[in-house]
Each structure stands twice: as C-alpha cells, then as structure tokens.
Image (cartoon, rainbow, N blue to C red):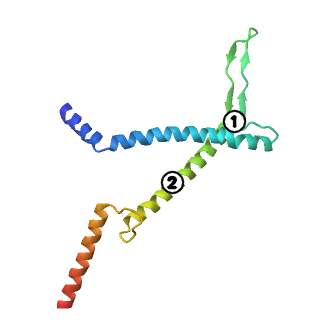
Amino acid sequence: MAKQLFKEFKEFAVKGNMMDMAIGIIIGAAFNKVIDVLVKKVMLPPLSLLTNGVNFQNKKIILQEASNAADGKVITEEVAIGYGALGEAFLDFIIIGFTVFIVVKFMNRLKKKAQDTTDDTVVTPKDIELLDKLTKLMEEQNALLKSKS
C-alpha cells in the first residue's frame, strides 16, 4: 500500500505538477507582498491625504471599550469591528483580481496565437501542428470521396 502511494507520488512529482505548483505558490506569495505594499504605502496615503489624514486601516466600530486596572493591566480587551481593514482587504482583492485578469487575458492571446498554424511569429506546439495536418488530410480525403461519388 505504502509502496504504491510512494510510486504515485513519484509519478506526480516527476510530471512537473509539483514543481509548477511550488513555483505558483512562491510567485503568489511574492505577488501578495507587492500588492500589500502597493495598497498600504502607495494607494492609501494619498487617499488619507484627500480625507484630511484619516487612516483607513485603523477605522473601526468599537462595540466594547477596553478596561484597564489602576496599575495599567488590561482587564478586558477592546471588542471592535475593523471595517478599515476590511476595506483594505477589498482593495487588495480588486487589485489582485484585475491583475490576474490582465495576465490571463495576455496568456490567452499568446495561446491563441500559438494554436494558429498559419502564424509564423509564434512557435506552434507539435501536437497542434499534427492535429492541423491530420485535419487537412481528412479534408482532402473527404473531397476525394465526394468527387468519386
């Protein structure tokens, strides 16, 4: 049982799925850092300036104030709804979503060009070339069969 599982894992890792996934995760983590800095350090400061210095990250609705003892120790923690952090997360989501949309659109355009066997500007994958040749041969055979009947 364990031997079969190890064999399947080895096949999975060798096929490149694991490497592709690892690369995607690493790039995604780095991309997340870039978006985080873009939102917090580039987009929110001008927005804060336009709103007379309001820091959106700290905006919250306090449901219960924190209470402290005379010596300064916290007796009960503050309970609050952090809508500023939610707004920041939505802004992150919109930027990431739009960026992914642009990248996918660009990749689809390249893929479509690569699948066009008549376009010499991009290398067409071998399987697409073979399918195109097969299609042409079948069309020729159909034309010959129609002309004989």
Mark 1 Cα-neighbour bin, 10 Å: few <14, some 14–19, many ≥20: some
Q: Could you say which is closer to the camera, residue 62 or residue 27? A: 27
Q: Could you say which is closer to the camera, residue 32 or residue 132? A: 132
Task: Looking at the image, tell me whether mark 2 or mark 1 is earlier in sequence order.
Answer: 1
Q: Residue 17 location, x and y as percent?
A: 33, 44
Outermost residue to the top: 71
Which residue was labeled with disc 1? Answer: 57
Residue type at tag 1: Gln
- The residue located at (49%, 58%) in the rendering is 106
- The residue located at (33%, 61%) in the rendering is 125
- Dot 1 falls on a residue whose secondary structure is helix
Q: Residue 122 location, x and y as percent?
A: 40, 63
Disc ID at residue 122 = none
Vertical relation: 105 (above or below) 3: below
Q: Quadrant of the N terminus?
A: top left
- The residue located at (28%, 62%) in the rendering is 127
Residue type at tag 2: Val
Quadrant of residue 117 within the rendered picture: bottom left
Quadrant of residue 19 within the rendered picture: top left
Q: Is residue 93 left or right of residue 122?
A: right
Asked if disc 2 and disc 1 are in contact, CB closer than 8 Å, the reply is no
Q: Could you say which is closer to the camera, residue 71 or residue 102? A: 102
- The residue located at (71%, 30%) in the rendering is 63
Which residue was labeled with disc 2? Answer: 103
- Dot 2 falls on a residue whose secondary structure is helix
Mark 2 Cα-neighbour bin, 10 Å: few <14, some 14–19, many ≥20: few
Q: Is residue 6 left or right of residue 112?
A: left
Q: How many marks?
A: 2
Q: CA distance from mark 2 to mark 1?
A: 29 Å
Q: Is residue 108 among what the camera can see?
A: yes
Q: Nearer the viewer, mark 2 or mark 1?
A: 2
Q: Residue 11 location, x and y as percent?
A: 24, 41
